[in-house]
Amino acid sequence: MYESLLFLNSVEEIHLKSSNSALGGNLVTSYVVQVEMTEDAKHSRKIFNEEVKRLSRALKDRNILLKDVGVTETSYELITKDSDGQRDTWQIIQRFGFEDPSCVPEILNDAYSRGDIGLLPRCGVAHLKSTTRKGVKQNRRLFCFLPLPIHIHFPSHVNGHFALDYETRRNLWKDENGGYNTVWNNCLMKHIIAPCYCSLLLKNRDFHIAEGPITNSILSQYSSLLPDLSTKDGVYMTILCKAIYERIGKKNLAVLPVRWPGNEGRHLWIGPGGMDEPTWKMWIDMGWDGSLGTNGILGYFDSLHIQIAEPPESSAPGYRSMSLMVASSVKTEQKKRKRAEIVRDILVASGFLLINCPMSIAGNFESAQVKVQAVSPDAVLSFYASYAQPHGLCRLQGLPKPLEETLFKDVETLTLVVAYCTGCDNYKNRLFGLPFLLTADGYLRCFEQEAIKYEPYFNEIVPHIQDQFFNYQIFHTLKLAVTTDIQLSKAFTVEEFAKALPALLPPEMFKAREEPVRIETLKAILKEKDLRWLARLWKFLYSCQKKLETEGNSRKASESMKNIVLPLLDWCLLPVNFRQQEYLFPIQKSRGVIKLPEMVVVQRTLISCLQKIGIPQPLFTYFPVDTDSIHMYYQILGNMDDASSVVLALAEVLKHGAIETKLSSHECGELCRYLVKSLEIWKGTADSINTIKQLPIFTTMYDKQVALSNSRVYVIPSNIPKIDMESWTAVQGIIFLKSSEELSELLKFLGCVSLNETEVYCSYIFQHFELLSQPGQKVHLGYVKDNLLSRLTTKPYYKEKPEHQREREQECNALLESLQTLAFIPTDDGSYVCASEFFDNQNEVFELMQEPVDFPPAPFDSPEWNDFLKKCGMISAVNQTMFCDYACQVEQKAQEVIDEKLTKQSRTLVKHLFSRDDINNTSFMNKVKSIRFVEPYTLGTFNRDLHDGCRMKNRSGQNMFIAFGNSITPENCDLVWTVQNILPTLDVPYYQRSEIYANLDIQEKPKPENVAKHIQRLCTKWAPEPHKLRPYAEFMALVLRKCYTLLKSMVRDDTSGILTDLKNTACIFDLQHCLLVQPRQVVLRWKPDKEIIPYLIRSPDELGEFIEFLKLLGSTLEKATIDQYSMVLEMIHDKVKDNELHANEKEAVCKATRSFFKLLKQSKEPVALQRELFLPGTDGKLHRSSEIIVNNDFLLGQRVEQFDKTFLIDLKEECDMSISEFELELLIKKLPASYQPEFLTSVVRELMDESFTEEDLNFVKMMQRKLQSDEMKEGIMRIAWHGVKENEKENERRITEAIEGLQNIQFIGVNIIRTFLVHKGSRINGSERNRHFHIKVELVDGKKCCKIFVGSKATESYNEHAMRIFYYKISQAVSYFTENIIPQSSFSYLEHIIQCNEHMIDQLLEMHGIKPIQCFQNLQRQFRPNPGQFVPLNLHHLLKQDILLLKIGDYVALEIDDPADNISTFTENETRGSPGDDDEGIERSSMHPTYILVKIIGILDEDKGPTIATYKIEDGNGVKTVSAALLYAFHRTVTNVEDVDAILEADDTKRNPTVTLDEAKCEIRQTLLDTWKLREDIRKKFIKRLLLRWHPDKNLDNSQTATEATKYIFEVIDKLSKGISLEEQLPYTTHSSSTDSSSNYAGAYYSYISQRARKHQEAQQCFQENYARNRENVDERRRRDFIKSFSVVSRNPQPGEGRRWLRQAEWDLKSVINDGLDGNWPSPEWACFKCYQAAKKALKGAQYARDSNSVTGKELNDMVGIFQTPELRDWVRELQRLLTSPSYMQYPTDHHQPMIPHEDFSDEIARRAQVLSQNVTDWCKRYIG
């Protein structure tokens, strides 16, 4: 009963009464329950109820829809008390309305609107906070304001305005068909009760936050508020529970308690979606003192007790559960705690967010498909990975630090956490950055990729780097293996130990020392008396060896041992007993420590010997017996079985001093025999020879024991005389040993040399012959001469074996070599010299070339000594070097004077040369052939008279001797005597002649290049004075013919360049005139009368056989060339210089000039001259052609009499040429530009006196109209095409563009024309004249314009001749401004059509046989509209402003841009005005809109009228849907043209009937009514069209109606903008008070379009007049002109599109400026790229503004080609040259390695590029306008 008051708003007390029979049946109160509320609570409930009533009435009255009912919510506390003394406290939450209108199903909205449902979207929940009832189970119910008999397993009572069943009204409506009642209950549960209950959860959360620490019981009560989805309370309650969890997840409500780190009992709150801004704010308000992380940090449900299993009490320490292993040394207090609790406490203390709720709640979230997270190893790893992050929640800070100072405190705790984390599959890959690394020094660290630690073994041998080793427990807990987990751990190898060792032991004491280290030193450093460190070290080495063996390296133990100790070889770590002391030897000397065996009888003497010597022996004192360490130590020592070890031990002993112990001869012999037997074993030991030599164990021939070091040791034969050998030994330090067969191998290995007799003398005695006494020298020399040499040179009588013969010969050769170097012949000064110092006196060459002192003295000059001395080396033959020296001596002497002795020496040497055996030796001949020692051939008399030849003279004036090289035999003398030496007749064996000549470079036949050079030298000498050749003319002609004959046979063409010099040499000899000329001065087979002697002649008759050869030299055949005549003029100029020509020279000049211009006239193409051109002037001199002036205007020529310049002679009078001024001008233009004379018209300017007034002359108007007429343009095009071959025709675009040049010609009438001439700014005196017309060309805005001034009396006073001149000049101007498209042959036709009436041009051209233009006829037949083309500006006035219903297939204009659309909204005073106002709009209206041609392919909403209809169009880029406001039909007369009718609409041959004002208003009214249903932007488009359609300036023939219609447009717009009926009258102030944007736009636009309307009208009038003047074929011409407007042959400027490109260019430049505000760009190449793009886009815009049909060019240089402004071209070329190309600024591939674009571009380049790009953009902006 007490629960009935929870949701009743007006009942606060209930009395239960019953009839009491004891009281006479009166009612007696048996139970009372009442409500107690605070005033605030009552007030809250009251406000809520009033709002509910207000909204209920609105729903009932249909003022609002059900979905539009907003949320109203209240919360208050209510207490119920009953008469039994029980008291309950309730938290009540009531709610009304929907948060989101879209959540209300449409079926409920419909049912509500029909009245089928009258329920309200209201609910409430009641939560029992406290009660005094004990032992009474609280049952939860559903309420419909009063309790329903429906008990639920829900945490609180639930109230709602439910749909109940019709019968009992005690249950919720159930409908299997899903009717609106079921939908209502579902919606109430999901969208009203669920949010209401969530508010209850938040209230409880806030209550607990305010109360302080939360106990476990409070947490349990709070957790019970979260409903259980597993209960079976029916479908509705399931929907409610799911909705609650879904809302918590969606809104991320912070209703889940999280343990507060470090504060027992306190909790934080978080939502299932993690941290967000509201949650962080709440934490801060709660006093959160930790780091503020980022949003999205999750909380995790605590499932550790499930994941971490506890081991049974009897389990061993190694028990594992989920990879968890706990060491056996767990502390007592931790044994009492469960593992999960330990891990949980550490995670909470570290800042890990653990949600303190049962896992069943996590299951509820998952059932509701709300994602939540339970704690997992993966989450823990991710959490600790945020350790180093600036906004992480991890509280573990300050690492590295001792473990006991961290949150983990001890190893066991850390091990538990780490073991838990190993439950993640990839935990090893995620350890980096985690604070789980515990090292052997007890410090906790983070795992780092750069600091990989060693496995925890043998760390005690490096006590100073314990921080580099893993802790043993952590290493095994992580289950690391150095072989697989190389990114986390590594093995501690010998190499690593060697790196760490210098920090433990001083390297200067223990490394790389020759002296061993005392063991006491190591004890002092390590502070160990027993030195266990040494044993651990060797055990470590042993373990490394075993590891290698177990890893599969099946190598020998010794090899693995060597690799193990390799890094430690230089370290003194080997304990050794040496000289009764304990030492540490370097490990690399371990083989030199010998383990001597026990005394064995066989080796007793040897062991005794070694012990006496004192070799190093092992020291086992510091090794435990039978351990791994001693085993490793034992392996690396040496033993006696290894003789190399014994040698190393002996070397170690010798390093510390010589062996002082006296050894017996027996011991020495035993040791020598040991060394001999084991020689193969120890001989490879380092420095073994030096070691053995230092041992005093060798016996000499005198039985003395000595060491062999520092001595040369020899074993010699016994038969060698021993005279003087003892003193020799004392002086030279040589030891002679007994020869012993037993020790021969050892002595040989030690370097002891065994010598035979020859070796003794050659290598020893002869080498030190000066040590012998004179008797000794005699004895030894006599022994060698009489015995040894005789024996070696005499063959034995028996057959000698080959090997013995070779040995004997070798000995003999060695002995002879020694004798040849032995000085035994006495000289006058008492010294001795070798036999090789003397020459054989029996040789003829030596006899002539050497001095007497060079021969042997007596008695050695006798014949009996000759053979002996030859064997001893006496010089007996002339070698190659000697011969060359002798020849050089002759050459040098010949430079001074040549006498008979020298001539004899020369002839003797030449004779000796050809008798030598080595005459064919190439290298020898190469040396000889260049020496000038040969007596030359004697020339004949004529030869010497013509040329002295190429001989050189000596100082005495005699002809020098010559060399063989490059000389020629005497039979070819006449062909080359001026360029080559001529040899005498040589006595050479015939069979060897060719080979010898080739080796000596002697030429049997002359080379063609030498013959050519011979001709050049010979002719060059006589060319200046050919008349002196008269006595030798015949011989000269003969010599040249011989040369021509040879060259003709050997030179077929001039590809080798042999004849190059001859072409420029006067090598053609005219015997008749005794004249030498150059080949180019000869014309073959030419007529005699055409000769210009001596400059240009015909070929001599005697040279007829050499015509082809002369052609190769440059002579021409039958006809002279233009270059030859220019050569004649040049030769005459070079002869006379600046002097005046005499009569003969003038005759030659005139003849050459006449022929020059005649050939120039015959040439169809421009000519290229190979020399300077000189032309005759009127002053009688020759001048450079570029310095002379041609009088190309007779009239001007008469006016420059006082002009001080040289003119070209009159070719008609002086040269008898028939040539006009025009023809002469054309001929001169064929010359190269640098050779062209200046024309008088280009040198002198005719200027017009400005003192005139313009007059309106009919003749001027007629000429202007004629020149600009279509008939004239078409006529010029016909003439341009006439007479041109089909394959040479220009393209249509070029011709059409050239015709546009006529627009730049203007006729002006004036009263008087007086002109004068100016040269270089100076007025020419006496040049003033009155003229009837004057043509002036000037530059206007970068374009050339022509103004033709015509005098007022010109046509009256002109005679026929004057008019011809006038029309001729006009024709020249037309030809110039149409880019000379008219051929010269057709120029007269141009004059004719300019003279006749324009309507007669067609007939005149047909009369002359000039056909009509075929290109436009074909264009009409082939015309197919191309969607996307720009509509030309000259057709804009033909676009209908009427809104028509278009048809599918029509071609119309689509507006894509109009500057009028961007007009700012003006105030009333600025924008509103009467029709005709035109203030600021004049200048703005010059900006034309932009249209493109499109095709209609579909119509939408056709039935709604033309205004509402929308169209599908094809614009060339695809299909689009556009409004009718953007489409314009064409209005023009075109009929019967295929594919054009779809474009051109209407027929205006007759004037449109005048539209009345009422009809206009009706049309305007309906259009605006339809328009007002559309979007504002489309509405403005229609308003714009109406205003332009009815503008008075566009409707001059019906201006009054147009004015009234325009006013009516404004009136309707104002009414519609204010929502006023069109039938009502507007107040006077309506216009000024209107604020509607459409109204304002209409006013502003009207001001803008005034000039546009006038321009349309003017264009329309001009259009009508253009066709009214000539009424023939009007329709055909209109159709043709319309097609031409869309063709590529017509210019189509589009300034609107140009401005669009220009805007982007300006923004690109602004970007460049912003990037480099301080003048420095971070990426100059990017700034340059932007500058390049800006210039390119600006030029593209200018191209569009000029002609959208000719927008071309990828590079800047290509794009600027169509503009003629020099300044612009200079900017663009410099920018292109500076930046190259876009790819050059972007990609490294265009740069030389290793450069990149950033390194090739600098700030200076970027600044210059910015300036140039800005200049280009500014110019384009001015051009576009």
Image (tube, rainbow, N blue to C red):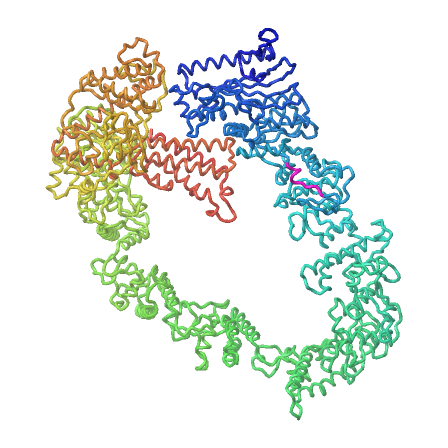
Give the camera-side residue of 136 and 672. 136
The number of numbered discs placed on residues in the rendered structure image is 0
Which residues fall within the magenta stretch?
303-311
Counting from the top left corner in percent of width and height, residue 1652 is at 27, 23
Instruction: Determine the image quadrant of residue 1263.
Output: top left
- Position of the C terminus, as image quadrant, is top left
Counting from the top left corner in percent of width and height, residue 646 is at 80, 68
Q: What's the residue at 53%, 11% (across, down)? A: 10
- Position of the N terminus, as image quadrant, is top right
Inspect this view and state whether residue 1599 appears: yes
List the single residue furthest toward the bottom: 797
Counting from the top left corner in percent of width and height, residue 596 is at 84, 68
Q: Is residue 790 left or right of residue 1654?
A: right
Counting from the top left corner in percent of width and height, residue 607 is at 85, 71
Residue 218 position (above or below residue 1411): above
Instruction: Determine the image quadrant of residue 1551.
Output: top left
Instruction: Determine the image quadrant of residue 602.
Output: bottom right
Q: Is residue 889 left or right of residue 1249?
A: right
Give the camera-side residue of 392 and 1204. 392
Give the camera-side residue of 1744 and 12. 12
Give the camera-side residue of 725 and 549. 549
- Determine if the magenta segment contains residue 97: no
Residue 241 position (above or below residue 768): above
Residue 499 position (above or below residue 15): below
Residue 1316 position (above or below residue 170): below
Q: What's the residue at 69%, 88% (across, down)? A: 791
Inspect this view and state whether residue 1312 appears: no
